[in-house]
Amino acid sequence: MKRFNRLVSAAVVSAMVLAMAGCGNTGAGSGSQSADSSGAENAQEGTSAQASSGSGAGSFMIGSMGPLTGDNAVYGIAVQNAAQLAVDEINAAGGVNGYTLELNFQDDEADPEKAVNAYNVLKDWGAQIIMGAVTSGACIAVTEKTMEDNMFQLTPSGSAVECAQYDNCFRVCFSDPNQGAASARYIGENALASKVAIIYDSSNVYSTGIYESFVQEAANQNFEIVAAEAFTSDNKTDFSVQLQKARDAEADLVFLPIYYQESSLILTQANSMGYAPSFFSCDGMDGILSVQNFDQSLAEGVMLLTPFAADAEDELTQSFVTSYQENFGDIPNQFAADAYDAIYAIKAAIEQSGVTPDMSVSDICEGLKGAMTQITIDGLTGTGMTWTADGEPNKEPKAVKIVNGVYTAM
């Protein structure tokens, strides 16, 4: 098959600046997040088996992978739970064009090599469509394999540009550059700060992608970047130097394009210093309220761009939150919402294209990738969602603030 390299150009980033997004953890995150959330046991029970009622021959076989164990398990568990919820709903309502869906979710521990191994397991199982991977490093590795096999791939939350680099690859979340640009615009247009400091992980593709586009867009906004301090995966426990420089520069807002594990340490250390700026982040912050031994009161007032807030009052969100809590005993996060929308996008693309389970993987892929540019989805993460041929979604960015220990729509 012909390879279509679709790395996002500066022009595309500029055109899509209103987009923001889904997270793409490369697996480098660390911290004290427990994988033993209330939904973990339910999630892991179906890790290596068909999780929905179908007979194979009359079913579309959807393979997925993400971290169910390790530091990033909060992401993978949410994705598996919500994807299964959507599959069960669709099957109970009669399926898709008379066919059922089957979901097989594999644990990749947010590791690229293990994600490829998971992909091979899923191929042996009979996967015809890939909904994953959850984290960016793993997703990039899997795209190489799905491209070789011409298998349709839709990641719910892989936000690195390369996660949608081939014409068979799409995403529900938004790319890292779009998150950074949208964050800068949101801060500027809502006059949230006059002096901004940035603390980012220079060893992480997710963090650097957001950081670079944030800086570029900040030049067009009415605030000043007064400090930009980096750390690496080898040194991410002591942030006193970075915080001191931010305070010395009189930053009234600190932008954290990083994951929740490191963010929890920064908030704790800032508090111990008596430094109390506003904090603004992206989807990687989602999960901070689940970190073990973290004082949640320190997250009060933290803002982040995310396309989903569990307290939203629309009927779809409330129905989803209720079903998720009933099935898994937890409040769904953005990653759950991304996955739920991903399954319904696959359903819509199947309906639009008319593909059937008896077709080859390649023919199914050709049908779905064409249909993705024709469908419109009213989902949890956006109404009127559409996709461009380069795999990117179109939807409006939203922001939430942590108030009284919950994410509240701004």
Image (cartoon, rainbow, N blue to C red):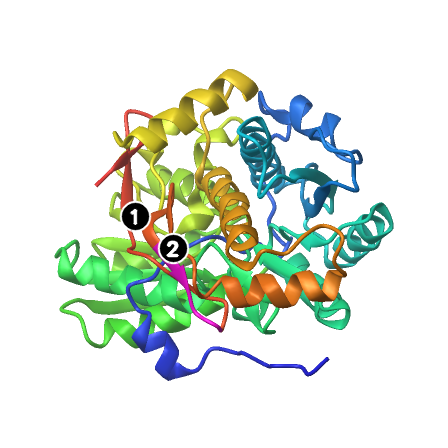
> Which residue shows up at 57% across the image and 26% down it?
92
Looking at the picture, how far across and down is residue 109, in whole percent? 71, 45
What residue is disc 1 on? Answer: 279
Q: Is residue 125 shown above or below 77?
A: below
Quick one: label 2, few (<14), some, or many (20+) residues within 10 Å? some
Note whether residue 315 is visible.
yes
Q: Position of residue 65 (x, y in %)?
A: 69, 47
108 up-or-down from 198: above or below: above
Q: Which residues are magenta?
A: 385-389
Q: CA distance from mark 1 to mark 2?
A: 34 Å
Proximity of marks 1 and 2: CB atoms separated by less than 8 Å: no
Q: Is residue 347 left or right of residue 149?
A: left
Which dot, 1 or 2, sits closer to the camera? Answer: 2
**Is 77 situated left or right of 358 in this image?**
left
- The image quadrant of residue 195 is bottom left
Considering the image in quadrants, where does the C terminus appear? top left
Q: Position of residue 222 (x, y in %)?
A: 13, 69
Work out which quarter of the rendered image holds the N terminus and state it: bottom right
Counting residues from the start of the chain, the first of labels 1 and 2 encountered is 1
Instruction: Judge by depth and name the residue closer to the eye, 355 or 345.
Output: 355
The structure residue drawn at horizontal position 58% and vertical position 73%, both measured from the top left corner, is 165
Type of amino acid at the residue the image marks with label 1: Phe
Indicate whether 167 appears above or below 51.
Answer: below
Looking at the magenta stretch, what is its main secondary structure?
strand
Q: Mark 2 — residue?
A: 376
Q: Residue furthest right?
A: 124
Residue at disc 1, secondary structure: strand
Residue 107 got which mark? Answer: none
Is 388 in the magenta? Answer: yes
Q: Quadrant of residue 221?
A: bottom left
